[in-house]
Amino acid sequence: MAEQNKIVWVAGPCSAETEEQLLCCAEHLKGKVQFFRAGLWKPRTLPSSFAGLGKDALPWLLKVREKYAQKIGTEVANEEQMNICLDAKLDFLWLGARTTTNPILVQQLADCLQTYKSTHKAERLPIIFIKNPIAPDLNLWIGAIRRFQTVCQEVIAVHRGFKTSDLQFGDYRYAPVWSLPIELKRNLPEITLLHDPSHTAGRADLVQQLSEQAMLLDFDGLMVEVHPHPVEALSDAAQQLDFDGFDLMFNSIRKPEKRNADIELLQLRKQIDEADDELWNAVLKRQQLSCLIGEYKKKHNLPVLQTDRYNELIGRRLEWGRRNGLSEKTIMQIVEALHTASVEQQLVR
Ligand code: PEP
Ligand code: MN
């Protein structure tokens, strides 16, 4: 699916609202994107929010395919919705973040697809997109993907950010936690991986920067919400791009070039390997000292965790970070990792 240097584009409104809205959006996106998205059933946190028009809006989506020869798709969250979409032969379906969170539901949906495949002797099934679960749990995401990979030809992963206790994800609605999609790629190297900057950002003005970061991280494509008049959108109004915003991004985003490392890069890597050797030797020395301290604490019946001492380490290192231009986030991640390794070693008495 993912070709070198070619970006996979999925775009369209968060929800299908009117026939005119869908057709005008599809007219704008034709020839640019490979997949046209529009939500029919919207899983909303509050029951008072707009929950989509359901199958009443399906004929408009089908009209998009008929008129623009565009691949069309929507989100499904239960068997009834999936069967409606399978009967309508939609080209792709996605499981939303709230659905991927529930393995029983995911299995039911995979079984539903399997049943459809056998009873209809279907040769071509829709492509299934699996969004990451709301919580940063890699195995839930991989599990959902695997459940579908056993049934259908093509499964695509979509990273849309996570709800975390990490207060340091700035202005984004959800934390990108890039380490998770990176790990997903290590576990499933063949998977096509898209980034959904709209749901991660929650704000239209942050969509472009996330998309650029995703390209630098070797994602295969983007799933973006686009609406003819975002301010009037019935769901996710703040994050949908208008047509000009989409074009601006579409015309500027590129995948970085892939080529073998040249001499300059190889030399820099050699230096970083040497710096790592020093660093790991220092980590080893730290662990050995921490072990001696652990023995001392045991002998004198002292607690392993000493919060005052930990606060002192954090404070000193944050101050050092400020002077040397290292961000508070980076310092905290490293101090926490080192301290946890030390505490866990001392707990084994
Ligand atoms: C959506 O794509 O409109 C959607 C609801 O996505 P998510 O499941 O990522 O919130
Ligand atoms: Mn949305």
Image (tube, rainbow, N blue to C red):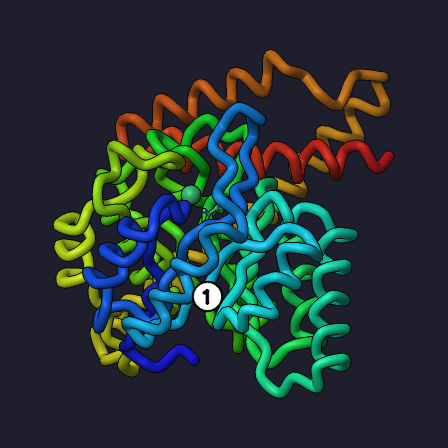
Compared across the picture, whether 298 is left or right of 125 comes to right
Residue drawn at the location 15% of the way across and 57% of the way down: 247
Q: Position of residue 23 (x, y in %)?
A: 27, 58
Q: Can you tell which quarter of the image residue 131 is in?
A: bottom right
Query: Disc 1 marks which amino acid?
Result: Leu
Quadrant (top left, top right, bottom left, bottom right) of the N terminus: bottom left
Of residues 59 and 11, the one nearer the viewer is 59
Name the residue tied to disc 1.
193
Compared across the picture, whether 296 is left or right of 34 comes to right
Q: Position of residue 63 (x, y in %)?
A: 36, 66
Of residues 42 and 190, the one nearer the viewer is 42
Compared across the picture, whether 54 is left or right of 114 comes to left
Compared across the picture, whether 195 is left or right of 141 comes to left
Q: Position of residue 47 (x, y in %)?
A: 58, 26
Tell me, yes or no, if residue 266 can be seen here: no
How many numbered markers are drawn?
Answer: 1
The residue carrying mark 1 has its beta carbon less than 8 Å from ligand 1: no
Q: Position of residue 234 (x, y in %)?
A: 37, 34
Give the answer, above or below, for where 53 lies relative to 270: above
Local packing at callout 1 (Cα closer than 10 Å; few below 14, some 14-19, many 20+) is many
Secondary structure under badge 1? strand
**Where is ligand 2, by quadrant?**
top left
Residue drawn at the location 51% of the way across and 22% of the way down: 313
Q: Residue placed farthest to the top in the image?
A: 308
Of residues 35 and 339, the one nearer the viewer is 35
Quadrant (top left, top right, bottom left, bottom right) of the C terminus: top right
Tell me, yes or no, if residue 241 can be seen here: yes
Residue drawn at the location 28% of the way across and 68% of the way down: 33
